[in-house]
Amino acid sequence: MSGYTVLSRAPIPGSSEDLILYQRDDEFTIRISGYVSELMNSRMHGSEDALAEYACPIIAGRAGVRVLVGGLGMGFTLAAALRSTGPDATVTVAELVPQVVDWNRGPLGECAGRPLDNLRTRVHVGDVAELLRGSRAVWDAVLLDVDNGPDGMTHKENDWLYSHKGLKAIAAALTPGGVLAIWSVDPDPKFTARLIKAGYSVETRIARERPGKGAKHTIWLAVRP
């Protein structure tokens, strides 16, 4: 990777791969060891913003909104959720890799405006599934940007999130009328059908990496009746 410097490596729990953080001038990128393509880039986060910007208006007007973000990444979805909710909302972010939290408190912090420093932010270091299993009507919105979507790359435990059983469990964890928003690198009609079968009202939207350009990513907005 010409011009990039490796800043840090972090093992992915439950996987043989590492996350690798690179920097070139004021640009950051994260890759998975053994993969050529980027996992995320600090200059291309439009669809990560859209994950929250599309979902949070669905629950607008509620008091004391509780949002759960699965996957911290570079902090862009967390920051967008904080911008898109009221002053009495709390946003919990669950991140499986502890070093990613450290990166966001350190070199990545300015990329998204240091959302971890916001007093409305809560951090859970661990699997987002831990906060969803067994919960009942806790979250008004669950925003998942985990392992590139239903067709995951690294952590097999993520398969549960996108299974019929997992989707039913998430529905139970949502408040009535709450929304599950899922980011994916690719469209997946079979997954849309799985959401419908799990009882959600589903809309599929497309978001670009940058305003009006860049790769197109898929966002499902699935509302619990």
Image (cartoon, rainbow, N blue to C red):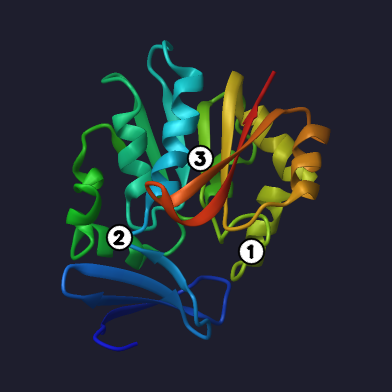
Q: Is residue 122 visible?
A: no
Task: Give residue 152's mark.
Answer: 1
Query: Mark 3 belongs to which amino acid?
Result: Leu
Q: Which residue is mark 3?
A: 143
Q: Is residue 145 above or below residue 174?
A: below
Q: Residue 34 at what x, y percent from top left?
A: 52, 86
Give the crowd class for mark 1: few <14, some 14-19, many >=20 residues within 10 Å: some
Q: How many angstroms separate mark 3 from mark 1 (CA)?
A: 16 Å
Task: Give residue 172's mark.
Answer: none
Q: Nearer the viewer, mark 3 or mark 2?
A: 2
Q: Which residue is mark 2?
A: 43
- First in sequence: mark 1 vs mark 2: 2
Q: Nearer the viewer, mark 1 or mark 2?
A: 2
- Along the viewing direction, whichever of 173 and 57 lies nearer the viewer: 57
The reply to whether dot 3 and dot 2 touch (C-beta < 8 Å) is no
- Along the viewing direction, whichever of 99 and 199 lies nearer the viewer: 199
Q: Based on the displayed image, in which of its 4 quarters is residue 186 positioned?
A: bottom right
Q: How many angstroms separate mark 1 from mark 2 (CA)?
A: 23 Å
Residue drawn where x is 45% and y is 48% of the image: 47
Residue drawn where x is 17% and y is 55% of the image: 110
Q: Is residue 52 above or below residue 57?
A: below
Q: Residue 102 at what x, y percent from top left?
A: 26, 63
Residue drawn where x is 70% and y is 37% of the image: 169
Query: What SS does tag 1 mark?
Result: loop
Quarter of the image with the N terminus is bottom left
- First in sequence: mark 3 vs mark 2: 2
Query: Mark 2 belongs to which amino acid?
Result: Arg
Taking the image as shown, residue 225 lies to the left or right of residue 7, namely right
Taking the image as shown, residue 213 lies to the left or right of residue 163, namely left
Q: Is residue 135 visible?
A: yes
